[in-house]
Image: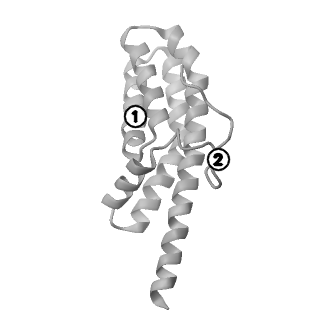
Amino acid sequence: MIGVPSSGGPPGRPYGPWLVDEVAFDEFLRQLSDPSARRRFTHDFVSLWDARAQRLTLALSVGDHDDAEITLLSIRSSSAMLGAIALTWSADQLRTCLKIGDRAGAATRMPRFRTVGDRTCAELLALEDGRDGCRRQETGAASR
């Protein structure tokens, strides 16, 4: 199971670089040429996190494997696009439990999955805020 350090990231990065691959994050953001679209995608991912996690928890508790699978695929695909490597890996672990019918294993992994997701959201916001600040500084320097 993946470890989840409580802190220890560099300044401005609350949980460290192991949660989000900055190269993948930056590449994805570069593909979205509109700065507002970049911010919106990241903030939408973060704002949807709790609802997705709750939906997954409910689906697992009532044995709705189809809904759990759909929710996990949604979380996994958007996590992978953002470079959220720990959350992508965690979603893969849960999907494996579902595929082999290991409900107990999935239930055991859910608290860690939630923690990884919560911390990933904090890390994504810190990265986006840092990128946004750099863009503001570059724009201000260019206009002088």
Q: Residue at x 43, y 18 (%)?
A: 64
Identity, as a three-letter code, of the amino acid under mark 1: Arg
In the picture, measured across the screen, residue 88 lies left or right of residue 49, that is left
Q: In this view of the protein, which residue sits in the foreground, 16 or 80?
A: 16
Q: In the picture, residue 101 is in which quadrant?
A: top left
Residue 85 locus on image (x, y percent): 44, 36
Q: Residue at x 54, y 19 (%)?
A: 1
Q: Residue at x 48, y 52 (%)?
A: 44
Identity, as a three-letter code, of the amino acid under mark 2: Pro
Q: Is residue 9 above or below residue 26?
A: above
Q: Is residue 107 above or below residue 74?
A: above
Q: Earlier in the sequence, mark 1 or mark 2?
A: 2
Label pair 1/2, CB-CB below 8 angstroms = no
Residue carrying label 1: 76
Which class describes the residues within 10 Å of circle 2: few (<14), some (14-19), or many (20+)? some
Residue carrying label 2: 14
Q: Is residue 105 above or below residue 49?
A: above
Disc ID at residue 44: none
Q: Secondary structure at mark 1?
A: helix
Which class describes the residues within 10 Å of circle 1: few (<14), some (14-19), or many (20+)? many
Numbered label tally: 2
Residue 97 locus on image (x, y percent): 43, 14
Residue 77 locus on image (x, y percent): 36, 38
* Image color mode: one colour
Q: CA distance from mark 1 to mark 2?
A: 22 Å
Closest to the camera, between mark 1 and mark 2, is 2
Q: Secondary structure at mark 2?
A: loop
Residue 8 locus on image (x, y percent): 67, 42
In the picture, measured across the screen, residue 144 lies left or right of residue 70, that is right
Q: Residue at x 41, y 67 (%)?
A: 35
